[in-house]
Image (tube, rainbow, N blue to C red):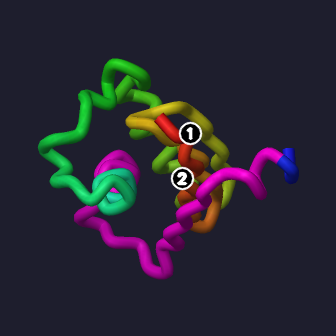
């Protein structure tokens, strides 16, 4: 996997403080919007690739330090990990 990652564009955002006003879903959407240089409102519907209930349950697990979620969305492999880390790996689409 390291070879594959080296050949891809990796964008990372790390959440340093928990913002109680922003859900994990909103944070993922914001990261993708920034990476694509487009408003969040112009992104494709994320619910076409991920059940909204997954984000709610993963969000509480991340707060406890026990989360890992990977999915494809809007031209990226999105990796969410404990500690508020979100990796976006460009799929070149």
- Residue 40: image x %, image y %? 19, 49
- Residue 5: image x %, image y %? 75, 52
Q: Write the residue at 39% across / 36% down.
A: 74
Q: Write the residue at 35% across / 28% down.
A: 52
User: Label 2 belongs to which residue?
Assistant: 88
Q: Where, by quadrant of the figure, is residue 9 drawn?
A: bottom right
Mark 2 or mark 1: which is in front? 1
Q: Judge the density around disc 2: few (<14), some (14-19), many (≥20) Cα neighbours within 10 Å.
A: many
Q: Where, by quadrant of the figure, is residue 34 drawn?
A: bottom left
- For label 2, the SS is strand
| Disc 2 and disc 1 in contact, CB within 8 angstroms | no
Question: Is 26 left, or right, of 1 in this rendering?
Answer: left
* Residue 52 magenta: no
Q: Specify start and end residues of the magenta stretch as a single range.
A: 4-29
- Residue 67: image x %, image y %? 64, 48
Distance from label 2 to label 1 (Cα)?
Answer: 9 Å
Of residues 44 and 24, the one nearer the viewer is 44
Of residues 44 and 18, the one nearer the viewer is 44
- Residue 20: image x %, image y %? 30, 67
Of residues 12 and 5, the one nearer the viewer is 5
Q: Write the residue at 49% across / 49% down.
A: 60
**Label tally:** 2
* Residue 26 magenta: yes
User: Label 1 belongs to which residue?
Assistant: 91
- For label 1, the SS is loop
Q: Write the residue at 44% across / 34% down.
A: 73
Quadrant into which the N terminus falls: top right
Numbered circle sitting on residue 81 = none
Q: Judge the density around disc 1: few (<14), some (14-19), many (≥20) Cα neighbours within 10 Å.
A: some
């Amino acid at each position: 996997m390291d070879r594959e990652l080296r050949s891809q564009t990796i964008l990372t955002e790390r959440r340093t403080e928990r913002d109680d006003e922003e859900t994990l879903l909103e944070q993922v959407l914001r990261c993708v919007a920034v990476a694509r240089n487009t408003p969040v409102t112009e992104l494709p519907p994320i619910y076409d690739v991920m059940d909204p209930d997954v984000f709610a349950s993963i969000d509480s697990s991340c707060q406890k330090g026990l989360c890992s979620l990977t999915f494809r969305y809007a031209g990226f492999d999105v990796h969410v990990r404990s500690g508020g880390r979100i990796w976006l790996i460009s799929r070149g689409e």
